[in-house]
Image: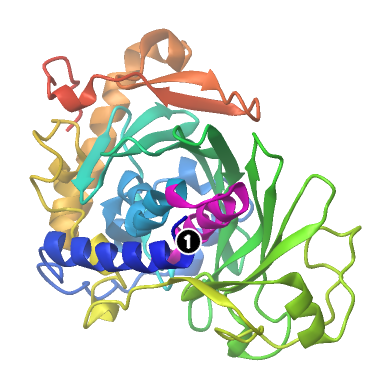
């Protein structure tokens, strides 16, 4: 049997080769424009406690991406999923999927701009390296984005639906990515589900903006009953900036036995260690009643390799040079508005949106005009159906509504046909 750690190292090398092969541009056409001097408080004070997805926001607070492209950023570290079926046992496979789930959030680091809300029927497609992904805006009221990513070698499928909720609380904005995410490993007969944690941007009115993920992510393998319970610790749980972005958790079995300890920062790395090594480091006994980290003694953030005999599962790629003047985009993100990735481009693809293109070119006035044009066009299209439910007059093109078979949550599944390239019946939404 091959050494699983050796397999991870080999796959990391393949990931770097793929990134080098498929990295086109390393920067946007122009730097991020200076923010227009708007009275932010006078605008936002009317929004306290409200659902911001229902409110039109000025284009000055956007980044030149659709939410569908932000979802595609889950695949930045797709090599982690590719390696999962190669792992020799269920514990190692769950650990690999949990590592992917944490890494999927790394692109959000220091990203303060708001993605453009997708139009009903909008799509995004990408084929890169060893995977391809399709996203579609399947509902507008309430907004729902569905996606499916798959390995070109057919060794995994990653799919889900996002029901975003965005609220302003006076000093912070909270993004709640509701919806279930599922990974299927057909060769292993295993399926995993989890829900993403919330993202909070602080100091909206006064001070320097900073963001964090908070909450608990529970990745469940439904065929074995193994779970990875990972806590995203809020800032201030210990002291100073050094405690930001920390994650800690355990992989447990059906009897709540702790099998592995996972720790790191969702912005930088994730490590694995034996629970006994953690107990020795912290001089404590691990509570079997609490499957998470709630009863661990208070301790400073655990740096990479802090727990004896740790294994490094994942490290984040460095950001491109001058990323701070290009919306803090990762190398992966810099490529998302390029054309020609994933075969013939659907007319509904958000790379065809004139408002996103204008913002990427640094023309705020034109971006605002085009954004208003598209929103008005969408409103005019909806007028004849004002008194009808959306499902009575609109059907998603590439996904169908369903219940997740593992969690019974609302979900959407890809119906097939997209990658044949026949877009003759696609709506003209732009």
Seen at 47% across and 44% down, the residue is: 53
Q: Magenta residues: mostly which secondary structure?
A: helix
Q: Give the range drawn in magenta.
A: 86-108
**Residue placed most toward the observer, 176 or 150:** 150
Residue 26, picture quadrant:
bottom left
Name the secondary structure under disc 1: helix
Is residue 361 among what the camera can see? no
Residue 19, picture quadrant:
bottom left
Q: Against 426, is 47 above or below?
A: below
Residue 236: % across, % down: 69, 81
Residue that numbered label 1 is attached to: 4
**Residue placed most toward the observer, 379 or 130:** 130
Residue 259: % across, % down: 73, 60
Residue 117, picture quadrant:
top left
Seen at 12% across and 25% down, the residue is: 421
**Residue placed most toward the observer, 281 or 415:** 281
Is 253 situated left or right of 108 in this image?
right
Q: Against 420, is 158 above or below?
A: below
Seen at 41% across and 67% down, the residue is: 6
Residue 240: % across, % down: 64, 91
Is 363 situated left or right of 99 in this image?
left
Is 50 situated left or right of 15 in this image?
right
């Amino acid at each position: 049997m091959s050494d699983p750690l050796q397999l991870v190292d080999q796959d990391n090398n393949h990931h770097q080769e793929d990134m080098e092969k498929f990295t086109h541009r390393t920067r946007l056409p122009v730097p991020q424009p200076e923010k227009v001097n708007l009275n932010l408080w006078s605008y936002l004070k009317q929004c306290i406690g409200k659902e911001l997805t229902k409110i039109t926001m000025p284009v000055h607070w956007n980044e030149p991406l659709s939410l569908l492209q932000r979802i595609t950023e889950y695949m930045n570290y797709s090599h982690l999923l590719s390696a999962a079926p190669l792992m020799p046992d269920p514990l190692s496979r769950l650990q690999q999927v949990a590592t992917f789930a944490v890494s999927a959030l790394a692109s959000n680091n220091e990203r303060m701009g708001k993605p453009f809300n997708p139009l009903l029927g909008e799509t995004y497609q990408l084929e890169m390296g060893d995977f391809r992904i399709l996203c579609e805006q399947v509902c507008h009221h309430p907004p729902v984005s569905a996606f499916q990513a798959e390995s070109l070698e057919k060794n995994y499928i990653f799919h889900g639906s996002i029901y975003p909720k965005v609220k302003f609380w006076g000093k912070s904005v909270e993004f709640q990515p509701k919806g279930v995410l599922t990974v299927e490993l057909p060769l292993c007969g295993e399926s995993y589900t989890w829900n993403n944690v919330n993202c909070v941007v602080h100091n909206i009115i006064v001070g320097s903006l900073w963001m964090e993920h908070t909450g608990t992510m529970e990745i469940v393998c439904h065929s074995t009953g193994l779970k990875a319970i990972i806590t995203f610790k809020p800032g201030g749980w210990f002291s100073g900036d050094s405690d930001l972005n920390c994650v800690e958790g355990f992989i447990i079995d059906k009897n709540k036995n702790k099998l592995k300890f996972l720790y790191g920062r969702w912005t930088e790395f994730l490590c694995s260690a034996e629970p006994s090594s953690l107990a020795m480091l912290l001089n404590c006994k691990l509570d079997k009643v609490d499957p998470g980290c709630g009863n661990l003694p208070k301790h400073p953030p655990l740096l990479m390799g802090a727990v004896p005999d740790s294994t490094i599962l994942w490290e984040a790629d460095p950001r491109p040079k001058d990323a701070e003047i290009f919306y803090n985009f990762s190398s992966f993100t810099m490529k998302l508005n390029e054309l020609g990735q994933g075969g013939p481009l659907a007319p509904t693809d958000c790379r065809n949106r004139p408002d996103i293109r204008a913002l990427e070119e640094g023309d705020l006035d034109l971006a605002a005009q085009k954004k208003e044009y598209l929103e008005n066009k969408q409103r005019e299209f909806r007028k004849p159906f004002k008194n009808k439910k959306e499902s009575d007059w609109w059907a998603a093109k590439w996904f169908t509504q369903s219940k997740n078979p593992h969690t019974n949550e609302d979900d959407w599944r890809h119906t097939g046909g997209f990658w044949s390239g026949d877009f003759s019946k696609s709506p003209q939404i732009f």
